[in-house]
Amino acid sequence: MADTPERRRAFLSNGLTSAVELDGSIDWFPCPRFDSPSLFNRILDEKTGGHFSIRPEKAFTLETSYLPNTLILKSKFTTADGNLTLTDFMPLGVPSIIRMFDSEIPFVVEIAPNFDMAMTRPSIEERDSGYIFKNVKTSESFEVRLSGTYERLGRGRARFSPGSGHILSIYFRNFNYGLFSKKGFVYPYPKEALHLTTDYWESQVSSARSVSMYSEAYYRSISVILGLMYLPSGGLIAAPTSSLPEVIGKGRNWDYRYVWIRDASYAIEALTNAGLHTKAARALSFLISVVDPSSKSFDHPLFQIDGTAPPPEEELGWLDGYKASKPVRTGNAAYQQIQMDCEGAFMDAFYQYVLKSKDVNYLRENMWAVRSIVKWTIGAWRLDGTSLWEEREANHHFVHSKVMSWVAMDRAAKMAHMLGHTEEANAWQAEAHLIRDDVMSNGISRKFGGFSKYYGAESVDSALLLLPLYGFVDANDPVFTATLKKVETDLLLKSGLLIRYESDSMGRVMNPFSLLNTWLSRVYTMRGEFGKASRALDVMISYSTDLLLFSEHVDSETREPLGNFPQLFPHAGLVEALLEYEDAVKAKKD
């Protein structure tokens, strides 16, 4: 089985923005927040995208790891003459990257930012201890302070002598209050910032429930979920990157730096079940804040991280794309779709939070949102729409979407019962029965006897695995058993990984979707097939990166992570699958 350099990618975050690093080079860094233009875009254009690299002058081998329960990256470069050790992290509260070094050998630092997604080359001012890179069109700046013994090599390049030190870099909307201004003394002190950032991550991640199986992957997934939360609002983004292709060179390149109702809802359930109720409530409150009580509950399937409507989709023609995969896009046209499953995903997350946290007052305060969603669902569940896969120009009566309307009504009824609203609960449960009857009448294939992808279809999609997970049908029900057999036959690859469905308007689906093995494992767990459940997770984790990170997709032959990285979906799914597996195995032993 082949291996690729991209498996060494690392993810840094401080809850404001994030960075992607590969072999000592920061190749992606949107500023000042997750969905802003990126200062470094080498991940999308090898030649002109821009980067911030620290590397030995001679050939090296590299080992990377995170400090336990953190998103603080340690990189050890080994050469014939000695070692260079880097500790890279993003301090809290500032769009900043701090890079601390301890080296036995000389090394070269190259800082090459570009503004406006690599459209604008900066001017450079050299200062006694660093650089100011200015956007020539605005007052923005990216400023760098150097510590250590070095000589400048021209335009953001420097050669450092052996020793210890740090490089502090910060983005500013206005250079007048930058690192080299009168206000410069207020910004992070690197050693103190490292200590405090370490404490922060450890306190957040270690508060989660423990597991005995794959604990390192579990805690890594918890840290990624938390790292994808925009702390000022609580919004959970689907991924921190844009336009990393699902398939090389096929145009399936999208911007995922937004809060999808569905993706965030799944992550809220993961946080809830992991016992991180405060974080779950924070993310849930974001979703409640964008509920529209006067029309469709969620006007868009995705929102910007401040809760506003998403921007239009645009193509950035000046960037070559990852491995020449054009177009590079910002914004996402999926906001135009009517996705019928969003309300159900949210409602289940809400219900699970209240059930596990026992925070009935939170439910009482936000019951208006439940009633709003009920009103929309009752009037809309009979309509067609797009599915969770966001197939463009593909409106159908998707079985998964219908079931999620059932979920919305069923969970609403359960929450009404929690508050003693019996009349509402009974009425809403009656509507849930209507939806279920409709699915059982129209959503089962006469050919193979299981649930179909959409009404009248003779094909399946992997979303049908969710039916028993939401309690719509028993996992051992004959109709679902036939569905599972069809999914295994048509969508399970030799690698043991699943694809979403066989094909769509853009062609045949080629690469597995990382999340899906968690659904498959959970189904096997519910069926009592624990060997199959653990094998599904074994396979999934074997295709993670060296740092146990998951991209949206993966090439099952080369193991190259594909699609945006890291992806919220599989990390949330892994947390859920591991917790459910652990609980089921324990219950069986007891």
Image (cartoon, grey):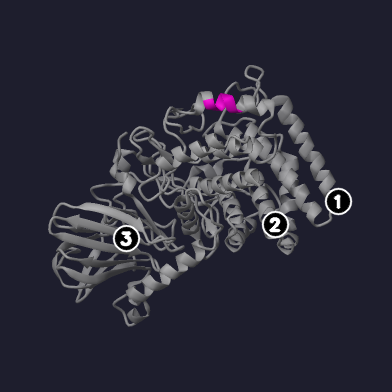
Camera-nearest label, 3 or 1: 3
Q: In percent of the image, x 75 and y 61: which residue is there?
A: 364
Q: Residue furthest front?
A: 589
- Where does the image place residue 163, in percent across and percent down from the top left? 18, 70
Q: Which amino acid, mark 3? A: Lys
Mark 1 highlights which residue? 422
Q: Which of marks 1 and 2 is nearer the N terminus?
A: 2
Q: Which mark is residue 354?
A: 2
Q: In percent of the image, x 44 and y 60: which residue is there?
A: 69
Give the answer, above or below, for where 215 lies relative to 457.
Answer: below
Q: Which mark is residue 74?
A: 3
Q: Is residue 28 visible?
A: no
Give the answer, above or below, for where 190 lies relative to 215.
Answer: below
Camera-nearest label, 2 or 3: 3
- Where does the image place residue 501, in percent across and percent down from the top left? 51, 29
Give the answer, above or below, for where 561 lies relative to 199.
Answer: above
Badge 2 density bin: few <14, some 14–19, many ≥20, Cα 10 Å: many
- Where does the image place residue 71, in percent across and percent down from the top left? 40, 60
Question: Which residues are drawn in magenta?
Answer: 484-488
Q: Which amino acid, mark 1? A: Thr
Q: Which amino acid, mark 2? A: Val
Task: Check the picture and name the quadrant holding the N terminus.
Answer: top left
